[in-house]
Every structure is written in structure tokens, then in C-alpha cells.
Image (cartoon, rainbow, N blue to C red):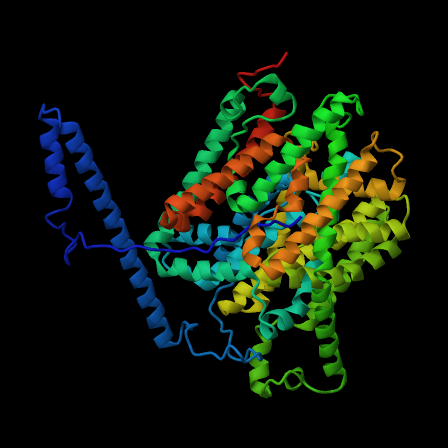
Amino acid sequence: MSNEIDQQHVTLHGTSSPMFDTNNNPQKDGYVEVTKNNEEIFNDDNSDNYLKYNSNYQEASDLFDEHERQMSEKETELDSLIQKKGEEEGDVDSDDDEFDENDTTEVGRFKERGEFSFRAIFVGCLIGVLVGAMNVNFGLRTGWTQGGSIFASILSIGIFKLIKPSRPFTKYETVITTTAASSAGTMASTAGLVSSIPALKLLGTTYNVGELYLWAFSVAFIGVYFAVPLRKQLIVVEKLRFPSGTATAATIKSMFAQGYETVKKARVLIAASVSSALYSFITFLVPLIGEPPMPKILHDYGFTFHLDPLMIGGGMLSGPRATFSLLLGAIVGWGILAPIITNYQWVTGPVMSYSGARGWILWVGVAIMTCDSLVQLLFLLKILWEGLVSIVRRVAARGSGRTIQRHFGERVILEHEQYELDNFLIPWYYIAIGLVFSSVLLILIGHFMFELKWYFILLAIPLSSILSIVATRSTGETDINPVGGMGKVAQFVFAGVAPKQVTTNLLSAGIISAGASQAGDMMHDLKAGYLLRVAPRKQFFAQLIGIIAGTLTCIPIYKLYDTAYNIGSSSFPAPAAHAWKAVAEVLSKGTSGLPQYAVYGIIAGAVFGGVVALTYKIIQIIRPELSQYIPSALAFGIGMIVPPKQSIAMFIGAMIFSVWKYRWPDSNNKYFFAISSGLIAGEGLIGIVLALLRLAGLKSLVTITYA
């Protein structure tokens, strides 16, 4: 499921005053004077000495900070001199040459800069593993996943600034790193680990690690092959914004312009990650720290303070609109409907069980989410039509014998220019061979390992290609990839062609959403590469390598969480999986198995979700400045599925972000993304360790029970 995150651009500020002279000796207001003053303080019994010491200590700290800033700026200047010298000698190319952005032939845009390096790929895969761990954890808790490009750019640049290699790490290498990292992180969504796979698990169908590996590798690459043919039209010709890709390129350029701030930002990210991991470990041993006792009536309905770094960081990234909608959904679902349902005995089980009120309000939340997704797709029909028309035009141009350049009013490419350009673009036969291989692999694995009829897979693949056009255009214009909505459409389609076949419904929809998820992710990376003039062919290979790395790690992490915590429990409620499961059940079995009166809740939820989503889209068109005040129906529905404590934690994170932005805007602009991502990353990593400790038998030192 796609996220509704408001991506933050990185703003770097900083000035420095010299603390060292030209011979690198300290100025007279430097460390020597401060040290002398501090020695006098320690030998004096004056009652004001403590304040004086603190003042001088702060001065020393500021001076040390200035020293680091100046040294880093000197290193940045040295890197620039090396770059300039390389350009003069012809060893290094500059991207500052004049280039006509309206020239869609792309002749002269790409140069060989050595960006496809081992270190760029290696670090990208390592960061991608971290992003994948974050997304498995966060996705199973909230139903959506995070993009990893900006996180990867901050962390990779900061790492190389800290280790200071002899050959400076370049912004072109950073693009390769972020491409590998984001493609690895996306595998949590592409492989269906937060949607179709846990949905099948909730229905009683489980797969071992080997089977999940086969499934993931069979669906992982299709979206890449769907995205590449769309690159020319969407990025080069139409120049769609792709906000996350544009933000990633802006972040990379900004961070290379300010060496000191880059190091500081990386340190902040690492500090936030370590703090989050340490806090999560402590709360694992002593849960009362992270979830203090509450009155029993509130606890029974899930209203507790759950001070979870991952959820707080996710709330900071998601923003006030989404998190307020989550909280509102929790209040309506758990605070109003659940007591009514329990009081009238429409269900018989405990409130937090699926045989109790939770199993009733789940259907209302799913109905809201489904109708929101369908309304969102309704407004994307124009995008789908434009995408199909553009493809037909390009095919017609080839069939008529005209060059694509002349058809689109571009200048004719000379033979030697075309030869040079072909070295940087992705050949068509790469796509043809890859698509045929992936399709055959998917048919074989799906048919023999997962009992999917081969003709259903043949239907799913072209349907996935069509919906990938919607996904890429939607992300290009709005930054939202409607994977969840497209999954619901696929479920409706396969409910018609394969009635009463729940497994076929979920896996076929998983194939379609996998293609859309990976295609949307790759287009953001290609947009960043286009802006920074990195060859698409190199990004293509980085994408493939990242997918392999992400698949190898996301699968065991998913199985680890499932074994240690049981996916679907309060620890990992998997709201997206519940939505997929519920839709498949209703489409396959009808409403006979629903709890008492739940069908009326579904109708009310569907009407509410459709009206709220429609209102939001209309307001977004006629008065876009007011759209932020319309609740998110999708988040509202999720708030009715996940335990209220998670919605509360995310709302707290959004409030922290809002106060921080209002009170200290400069600090917020600099470090917001580093801190929020660090909070998620720290718990994402330590969560793996805690799951292993849980399986090993380690339990909390202190527990609390409610009579």
C-alpha cells in the first residue's frame, strides 16, 4: 500500500568564522584561552564558578564545532579542486555544461563518470537491507511502506564524508546507491509481504522460506520491465514532476554543496537510530516504560499510550492530516462502535479478538479503505487514457517508418550521436528478454508451486502492465502510488474469472500490485538520475542488484516476525492484509459468514469512505489550499483496524513535528527527515534482534496484568 507522506526537501545552512590562522595555529580566542579559564575555575571556590564553567564549556563546544565546520569546508573545497582539475585534464566530466532541457533527444546528457562502482552498489544494498527491514516492520503495523531514496542519500553521503576515502564519493555514485537501496527496500511491498502473503496466512495458508523466495523472485522484476519503456514519454517528453525523485535529486545536490552540514545530518540520523534501538531494547525488558498503565476500561478497548519510536517517527513523516485521520478512525471504531457492539452482544468474544468487537469494526474499516481506493482510481482514468494514447502514438510512429525524433518534433540524431547515446540508454532487447524470462518463470512457479492456473497468470501480467501505467503516471503527478486500489480492482476482476477461489484471487492480485509497486519506485529513481545526468542503463543494473539484495533479506525478516509474534496479532496487526483478506472472502463467499449486522456496517463504511474521498478530490481541484483539512478516508479506515495505541503514537509523532516546525523551522528543515527516519531505522533493526531473543526464550523483566 502506498504512503501519503509529504516529502521534505533538505535545506542546509551554515556559516563559519575562522578559528585557525593560515598556519593552522589557534587564534587567541581559541582553545588555549578557554582551557586557561577552566583551570582557574576549578581552583576557585566562588559560588558563581559553576555558571562560569558552563559558559566557558559552551564556548569551547562552539569553538570545536566551528573547527569541525571549517575543516569540513576545507575538505569540500579540496574535493571541488580535485573535481575541477579532473575536468581540465579530461578525466572527470562536469554536469554543469550548458544543456538544452527542451532537447528530448538526450544527446550529450550522459557521460561516463565511473558512478557504477563497487562501493556505490555495496553501500546501496546495505542501506536497502535496512530500508527493507524498516518496511517489513512498519508495513505490518500500519499498512503502508516508506520510500528509501532520501534516507539512502543522507546516510550514504554522510558515511563517505566520515570515512573520507582517497577518491571522493560523487553525487553520481549517490544516485546509484539510492537506486539500489530503494529497489531493495521496495521488496517488502513488491513481494506482497505486507498485503497478499499475510492475507493468505490469516486464511490459514502458510508458505515456508523457500516457497516465499520463489514467489518473490518470480514477481520482483516485472515492474522494472514495465517502467523502462515509459521513461522516455513520462520523464523526458512530458517531464512529469515525480516529487520524490525530484526531492532526492535536490537533496543530493544540496548535501554535496555543504560538507559540514552533511556530516552533521548523518550524525543526527545515526544518533536517532541508536537512541531508538536502545529505547526499544529497554522497553522490551521493561514494557511499563513504553506503555504505562492505564485505567482498565481504556486498556480493554486499546486506548493506551504506546511510546514507540517507530510509530512516532512514522507519524512525523506521515503528517497531521493522515495521523489525525488515524486517531479519528480509532475513536469512532474503538471508542464508539466497539462499546455499542459489545453492549448489544452482536459478538461474543473479547473486545480485542477477531471473534469480538475487533472482528466487527474490521469490516467497516475495510469498506472505507476499499471505497477510498476505488474513488482515487476513478480520478486516475484520465491518466490511464493519456498513458495508453502516448504509447499508441509511439508505436504508430515506428510502424509508419518515421523516426521517433521527427514524430515528436525533435531534431534528427546523427549516426555517431546515436551510437554514443545507445551506450547509456537501456536497449529494447534487455526489456524483451527480461519480460519473457520473468513471465515464463512466473507461470512455472505460480502453476506448479502455488496452484495458480497458467491462464490466470497470463491474464494478470498484461493487466499489471496496464495498471503500471496508472501507477507511474500517478506517482509522477501526485507522488502517490495507488497500489492498494489497484489490488482491489484486480481482486474484483479475478472474482469474476475465478469465482470462490480465494488463493487465486489474492495471488493474482499480488502479481498485479507487484508490477505497479516496482514500476512506480523505479520511475522516481530514473527521474533523480535524469536530473543529475546519470545513465539509465547503470540505474537499471543497480535496480536489478538491489532487488536481489532486498529479496534475500526481506523474506527471512518477514518469517522471523511471523514466528516470533504471529502476524495479525496486536504487535503486527497487518491492516493491509486484513483488507485484502476481507475483500477476497466477500467476493468469494458472499456475506453469509459476516458477524451479525456487519453488512450494515459495510454499507455505511462504503458510503462514508466514498463521500470523504470524493469530497477530498473535489476540494483538491477547486480549493487545493483547503484539502489538507479534509480527513483521509484511507487512514480513517486503517485507524479502525489497528489497535488504537498505534494511532495515538503516530498522532503524537505528527504533533511533535508540527510544534517543532512552528517553533524552530530552521532546525526542522535541517534535521526533520534524519531524526524521523532514524527513529524508524533504529527500531527496524533492533526489532530483528528482539524477535530472535523472543524465540530464544527471553521475556520481559516486568509485566502488568489487568484483572
- Residue at horizontal 68 percent and vertical 42 percent from the top: 194
User: Looking at the image, how many numbered discs can be counted on the residues?
Assistant: 0
Toward the viewer: 403 or 340? 340
Q: Is residue 698 above or below residue 376?
A: above
Q: Quadrant of residue 242?
A: bottom right
Q: Is residue 512 left or right of residue 156?
A: right
Residue 517 in the image: x percent, y percent? 67, 54
Q: Residue furthest top?
A: 707
Q: Relative to the observer, which residue lies in front, 42 or 221?
A: 42
In terms of depth relative to the viewer, which is nearer, 600 or 159? 600
- Please tell me which residue is depicted at 78% across the width and 56% down the height of the picture: 441
Left-right relation of 207 to 152: right
Residue 246 appears at what percent x and percent y? 52, 62
**Vertical comparison of 99 with 525: above or below:** below
Position of residue 468 relative to residue 145, above or below, is below
Q: Residue at x 45, y 52 (%)?
A: 154
Q: Is residue 253 visible?
A: yes
Asked if residue 310 shows in the view, the reply is no
Quarter of the figure with the C terminus: top right
Looking at the image, which is closer to me, 226 or 672? 672
* x and y, in percent, of residue 343 in the image: 75, 21
* Image location of residue 561, percent across then percent down: 65, 33
Q: In terms of image quadrants, where is residue 645?
A: top right
> On the picture, is 534 further left or further right than 548?
left
Looking at the image, residue 505 sits to the left or right of residue 633; the answer is right
